[in-house]
Amino acid sequence: VGLMVSEAEVVPLARGIAWVGAGCAAVTLLVYMGALPLDGFVNAARVQSFFQYANAAGIWFAAVAFLAVASGDRTLAAASPLMIACLLLTQSGGAILAAVLGWILFSVLAWRLDKADLALGLWAMLACAVVMAACALFVSPIALLPASLACMAALYWLFGTNLGETARKLPKVLFLAVPIVAVVLIVLAIALFPERVNRASQTFIERFIQMGDGVRVLAGSPLLGLGPDQWQFVYLRDQSAQYTANVIHNGYLQAALDGGFVSGVLVVAGLALAWVRS
């Protein structure tokens, strides 16, 4: 959608999406704390939110949190810990890793562009979100309520101060320490949740095996594919390793399997056309 709107519409569109993310995060945290009885939002202590799928929810909350950080809206930025807390509570290793890499890139770019205040604000928001997730995981889900209110109040106050002046007083080398902090957080996650990390690595490998199986199946019927949503019935016959997957976890390959090679090409062509027209 962002590729098909004018430059003047990008900022309000990004803010609107970030506000939707803030609303999703608030509802999701209320469900996690047991205040709202909505099925499917939490499964085995993992947040799934409206997506009913932890990994998709993790990517969503990571994206809208970054939009909130860069929005320039004090209230919206103060609400961003809710989104990052939801990201952490999904326990999605891939989404969290992608967010950490984005954090590194964002901070380094902000420093290079002499916008250290943005990097400093992001650090503060992530620190609050880690505290909130720790309260939920190691104290009690209900502890999220006071923790989230305290973090939002603190950040609202922080973003009302001259954050840029504070950032300029800090040594610039401090902003280069972000990769080190990220590595420490990843090591701590591995130490605290070794079984979860092991399952995530196995799932990661399985995804590549699934895609390889999908390409092999598509080669047998390249023009028509398998038909809509038929992968879930076919993969058991053609899988090269033991796994369970109703979808192939690759949108382009899924489109080709559903409607043949032409279907996959049309999806890619549509994206390319939107990019060129932008």
Image: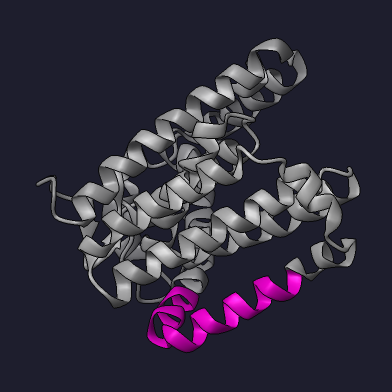
Residue 213, relative to residue 6: is it above or below? Answer: below
Q: Main secondary structure of the magenta part?
A: helix
Q: Residue at x 55, y 39 (%)?
A: 77
Q: Nearer the viewer, residue 145 or 14?
A: 145
The spot of residue 76 in percent (x, y) is: 50, 33
Q: Nearer the viewer, residue 146 or 223?
A: 146
Query: Looking at the image, how many numbered discs can be counted on the residues?
Result: 0
The spot of residue 78 in percent (x, y) is: 50, 41
Q: Is residue 155 magenta?
A: no
Residue 113 lies in what quarter of the image? Answer: top right
Q: Residue at x 58, y 17 (%)?
A: 12
Name the colouring of the figure. Answer: one colour
Q: Nearer the viewer, residue 168 or 133?
A: 168
Q: Is residue 248 visible?
A: no
The spot of residue 8 in percent (x, y) is: 70, 11
Q: Is residue 185 magenta?
A: yes
Tell me the quarter of the image containing the N terminus.
top right
Q: Nearer the viewer, residue 99 or 203?
A: 99
Q: Is residue 112 visible?
A: yes
Q: Residue at x 34, y 38 (%)?
A: 24
Residue 266, relative to residue 67: is it above or below? Answer: above
Name the side, left or right, on which 183 lies relative to 129: right
Residue 36 lies in what quarter of the image? Answer: top left
Q: Residue at x 28, y 50 (%)?
A: 29
Magenta segment:
179-202
Tell me the quarter of the image containing the C terminus.
top right
